Image: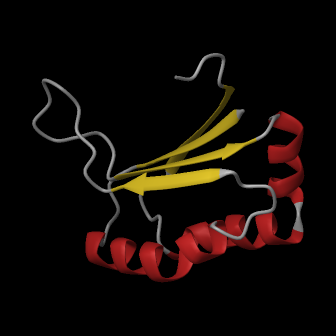
Amino acid sequence: MHKFVVLYNQPEDPEHFRTYYENTHIPLAAQLPGLKAWRYSFDVSSPGQEDPPYFCIFEGEWENEAAMGEALNSEQGKKVAADVPNYASGGATILTYPITKSS
């Protein structure tokens, strides 16, 4: 399995982010080809910090890195990427990695 993680920074308008993300962006992302599992959360915390560094986190999983790359470069992947500026005014960090062990 290969993981795709997006760490969203605090947006200028949290309510707009949340509404747009859940009603528009997530339905787009859920249609990415080969996506095996996905999840997101707005309840992001960081131990020992009063204000969490991230507003939202998204995780997607593909069978392997090649499948993820195909999905992100597909027509649907391009739609998903083009949609990000519509809500993520605070920017985001993207991480990808192979899952080496899962229980």
Q: What percent of the width, then of the height, locates residue 86?
A: 54, 76
Residue drawn at point x = 38 percent, y = 72 percent:
17
Residue lying furthest top in this view? 100
The image quadrant of residue 31 is bottom right
Q: What percent of the width, then of the height, locates residue 7?
A: 46, 44
Residue drawn at point x = 63 percent, y = 67 percent:
30
- Quadrant assignment for the N terminus: top right
Q: Is residue 48 left or right of residue 74?
A: left
Residue drawn at point x = 56 percent, y = 53 percent:
38
The image quadrant of residue 3 is top right
Q: Is 28 placed above or below 62 here?
A: below
Badge count: 0
Colour treatment of the image: secondary structure
Q: Is residue 38 left or right of residue 52?
A: right
Q: In this view of the protein, which residue sits in the foreground, 54 or 102?
A: 102
Q: What percent of the width, then of the height, locates residue 85?
A: 57, 69
Q: What percent of the width, then of the height, locates residue 35?
A: 72, 55
